[in-house]
Amino acid sequence: MKILKVTGHALKYGDDINTDLIIPGKFLTLTDPKEMAKHAMEGLDPNFTKKCEDGIIVAGKNFGCGSSREQAPLALKYAGIKCVIAKSFARIFYRNAVNIGLPVLECEQAFDEIGENDVLEVYLEIGTIRNVSRGTIVRAQPLPKFIIEILEEGGLLNLLKKRIKNE
């Protein structure tokens, strides 16, 4: 069995990070995800785009609350974020992230046990987060098979295109 693994360094943010903080409304007119990515989290962390390549966001509760804008997870993905781990997610953000191929994991303990810039290995199918920097492991909610399929194809549209092509 192949295990989907994501590796990167931790970027920590607190509770209630809303979609307006992830991608401010004034940038919603941009249609190129690479251009959107240049403005990801800029109101919250002006240095975000300088440090987010191969980053894994580790956040508190209710990550992605606010509007239902799909641009929020898209901006994070194109900025270089490999995964988002949070105590909890706004439901629409969670689903939008999966749909565009950005892995998201719920883990109550991660925020308290992972430090800024810790190197992480995240095993999505089994819900294991290995903190290489500290030599510890935390357990997250494993992702179901159908979500793993979507992520392996880089998003829902890619999976659907593949299925149609193979019919």
Image (cartoon, helix red, strand yellow):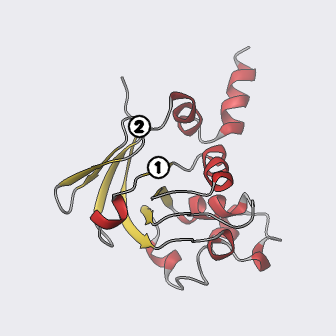
In percent of width and height, residue 105 lies at 46, 49
- The N terminus lies in which quarter of the figure? top left
Query: In the drawing, does residue 106 fall left or right of residue 155?
Result: left
- In this picture, is 9 found above or below 97? below
Q: Residue at x 50, y 32 (%)?
A: 144
Number of marks in the rendered image: 2
In percent of width and height, residue 79 lies at 56, 66
Residue position for label 1: 105
The amino acid at mark 1 is Leu
- In this picture, is 5 found above or below 17? above
Report helix, strand or loop for mark 1: strand
In percent of width and height, residue 6 lies at 39, 48
Mark 2 Cα shell of 10 Å, populated few (<14), some (14-19), many (≥20): few
Q: Residue at x 61, y 45 (%)?
A: 98
In percent of width and height, residue 107 lies at 40, 53
Identify which residue, 23 or 79, lies in the foreground.
23
- In this picture, is 13 found above or below 98? below
Residue 118 tag number: none
Q: Residue furthest right?
A: 29
Report helix, strand or loop for mark 2: loop
Residue position for label 2: 4
- Of callouts 1 and 2, the N-terminal one: 2
Q: Quadrant of residue 125?
A: top left
The amino acid at mark 2 is Leu
Q: Residue furthest left?
A: 135
